Amino acid sequence: MIDYSLKALTADELSFKVNPIQMAPDTKFEIKPFFSRRIQTAKENPAINIVVLECKIESTEESPKPFNLVSRLVGVFEVHNMTTDEDRRIFAINATETMFPYLRASVTHVTSAALVTPLNLPVISGATLFPDDKGPEQYTINFDSKTVN
């Protein structure tokens, strides 16, 4: 059975930028965050897995947003007994579920510190945040082949 523990968690990047767009006072924006995750194994110790979880909100010409936001967190996990692809899938889901509340809090904090209406991301299960995690017959885990120095 896979055994893991979170050893460290840090913010790699927290950024907020107001976009100068003209809008009517009652304009509503559809804010759709983009989430990404990368998992790497440390070269010196295969039991150490680095998980990078990121939330981005970017304005485009087709979909203008009042601001751009990046919140990227890095978690260091010690993992034992992860031998199969299914173990890797389970670890990816569990690591996401472990880190996502911190990502939610960082997005809310960054937006409130920027003196805009705080953005509260919904509570989402780690198994539904990324479509690749939904089930053993319909997933592909993209483990980065590069290792962390």
Image (tube, rainbow, N blue to C red):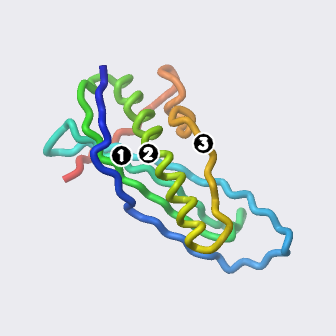
The residues bearing labels 2 and 1 have C-alpha atoms spaced at a distance of: 9 Å
Task: Give the residue number, with chain letter if any, for mark 2.
Answer: 99
Q: Are marks 3 and 2 in contact (CB under 8 Å)?
A: no
Task: Give the residue number, with chain letter if any, for mark 1.
Answer: 51
Residue type indicated by callout 2: Met
Q: Residue at x 42, y 33 (%)?
A: 94
- In the figure, is residue 61 to the left or right of 126? right
Closer-to-camera residue (88/111): 111
SS under mark 2: helix
Residue type indicated by callout 3: Val
Across and down, in percent, residue 70 comes to 51, 63
Note whether 2 is above or below 23 in the view shown: above
Q: Residue at x 50, y 58 (%)?
A: 106
Q: Earlier in the sequence, mark 3 or mark 2?
A: 2
- In the figure, is residue 74 to the left or right of 30? left
Residue furthest left as drawn? 44
- In the figure, is residue 19 to the left or right of 140? right
Q: Earlier in the sequence, mark 3 or mark 1?
A: 1
Q: Are marks 2 and 1 in contact (CB under 8 Å)?
A: yes
SS under mark 3: loop
SS under mark 1: strand
Of labels 2 and 1, the one closer to you: 2
Counting the numbered discs, the total is 3
The residues bearing labels 3 and 2 have C-alpha atoms spaced at a distance of: 12 Å
Q: Residues within 10 Å of mark 1 (few under 14, many from 20)?
A: many
Q: Residue at x 58, y 73 (%)?
A: 114
Of labels 3 and 1, the one closer to you: 3
Task: Give the residue number, with chain letter if any, for mark 3.
Answer: 123
Closer-to-camera residue (149/105): 105
